[in-house]
């Protein structure tokens, strides 16, 4: 039974890693982007109580899972059930390059063109990672990583050989 939380900046490779683990290890996969936002224009955050209920239902329905996202407040809701965490702590430049090269995410966008319309906004968001102090920030992610007492891994590069495990 494997239960993994993956987090980091936008463009750090959370979805890519989560999908790989889900496929190779037969883990249920929850992308927190799907439940964190209401489908409104402009998007609004889902109430934390509603998000918590969805996360708890997902964990109850699945013995082995991977949950990924940049939402420290939501990750904390699954922390007690997780067996490990993986922090994708790539440089802002690497995250921007990954965002520019990301494949179409059909579970989020109707087309690749629609996804690419958000690229400028996404790059600005990625650039602000080290400056923000919210639940999406490097500060929040580092705090979550440091206070976690279980198995944890910090990945600092797209290269598979550059991991630091604790």
Image (cartoon, helix red, strand yellow):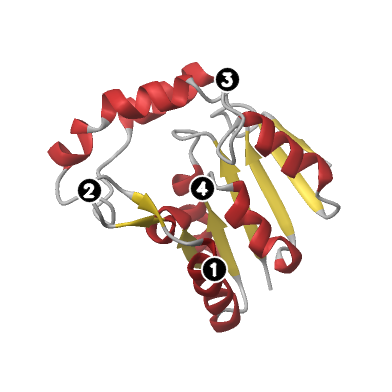
Marks 2 and 3: in contact by CB < 8 Å? no
Measured in 3D between alpha carbons, the distance from the residue under mark 3 to the one under mark 2, in whole angstroms, is 26 Å
**Could you tell me how many numbered marks the image carries?**
4
Q: Residue at x 58, y 26 (%)?
A: 90
Contact between labelled residues 2 and 1, with CB atoms less than 8 Å apart = no
Judged by depth in the image, the label closer to the viewer, 3 or 2, is: 2
What secondary structure is marked by label 2? loop
Which residue is located at x 53 percent, y 62 percent?
A: 48
- In the image, 155 versus 7, the foreground residue is 7
Rate crowding at label 3 as few (under 14), some (14 to 19) or many (20 or more) other CA atoms within 10 Å: few
Decide which of tag 1 and tag 3 comes sooner along the chain. Answer: 1
Real-space Cα separation, disc 1 to disc 3, in angstroms = 28 Å
> Is tag 1's residue or tag 2's residue first in the polypeptide sequence?
2
Q: Which residue appears farthest toward the bottom when viewing the image?
A: 61
Q: Nearer the viewer, mark 4 or mark 1?
A: 1
- Precedes in sequence: disc 2 or disc 4: 4
- Distance in Å between CA atoms under marks 1 and 2: 21 Å
Instruction: Check disc 1 and report the residue beneath it.
Output: 49
Which is more foreground, mark 1 or mark 3?
Answer: 1
Residue 59 pos. (x, y %): 59, 75
Identify the secondary structure beneath mark 4: helix
Mark 1: few/some/many CA within 10 Å (<14, 14-19, 20+): few
From the image, tell me which residue sits under label 2: 41
Q: Which numbered marker is on residue 17?
A: 4
Q: Which residue is mark 3?
A: 131
Q: In this rendering, is residue 132 above or below 166?
A: above
């Amino acid at each position: 039974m494997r239960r993994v939380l993956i987090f980091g900046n936008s463009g750090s490779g959370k979805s890519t890693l989560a999908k790989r683990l889900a496929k190779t290890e037969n883990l249920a996969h929850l992308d927190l982007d799907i439940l964190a936002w209401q489908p409104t224009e402009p998007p609004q955050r889902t109430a934390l109580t509603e998000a918590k209920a969805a996360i708890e239902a997902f964990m109850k329905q699945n013995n082995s899972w991977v949950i990924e996202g940049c939402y420290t407040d939501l990750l904390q809701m699954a922390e007690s059930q997780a067996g490990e965490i993986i922090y994708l702590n790539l440089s802002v430049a690497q995250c921007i390059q990954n965002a520019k090269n990301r494949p179409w995410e059909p579970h989020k966008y109707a087309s690749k063109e629609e996804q690419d319309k958000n690229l400028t906004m996404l790059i600005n968001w990625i650039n602000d990672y080290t400056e923000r102090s919210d639940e999406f920030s490097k500060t929040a992610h580092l705090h979550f990583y440091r206070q976690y007492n279980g198995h944890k891994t910090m990945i600092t590069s797209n290269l598979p050989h550059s991991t630091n495990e604790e």
